[in-house]
Image: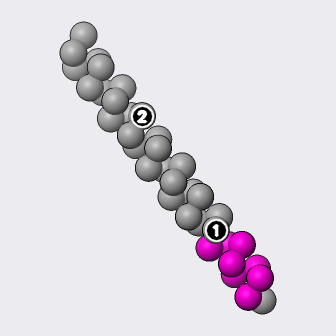
Amino acid sequence: VQTNYLLSELQAEKGLQISMDLKKTNLCNVKNMFDL
């Protein structure tokens, strides 16, 4: 049970990291649009 808990924690952390990276990418894209 403990390992399953740790795995889900890792997956949640990875998902959070991915969504934050996506937000950063979106912000960069918006900035680039305004620069054009």
Q: For the view shown, which residue lies furthest in the bottom direction?
A: 36
Q: Amino acid at mark 1?
A: Leu
Mark 2 is surrounded, within 10 Å at the Cα level, by few (under 14), some (14 to 19) or many (20 or more) other residues, namely few
Q: Earlier in the sequence, mark 2 or mark 1?
A: 2
The N terminus - image quarter: top left
Query: Looking at the rendering, which quadrant does residue 29 occupy?
Result: bottom right
- Work out which residue is located at the far top of the displayed protein and give it: 1
Magenta span main SS: helix
Q: Residues within 10 Å of mark 1 (few under 14, many from 20)?
A: few
Q: Give the spatial CA distance, label 2 vs label 1.
A: 23 Å
On the rendered structure, is 9 left or right of 3?
Answer: right
Residue pointed to by mark 1: 27
Q: Looking at the picture, how far across and down is residue 11, in whole percent?
A: 39, 34
Q: Is residue 35 above or below residue 24?
A: below
User: Residue drawn at (57%, 57%), measured in percent from left and top?
Assistant: 22
The stretch in magenta equals 28-35
**In the displayed structure image, the side of residue 20 where residue 35 appears, left or right:** right
Determine the residue positioned at 51% across, 58% down. Answer: 21
Viewport quadrant of the C terminus: bottom right
Q: Name which residue type carries label 2.
A: Ala
Q: Position of residue 18 (x, y in %)?
A: 48, 50
From the image, tell me which residue sits under label 2.
12
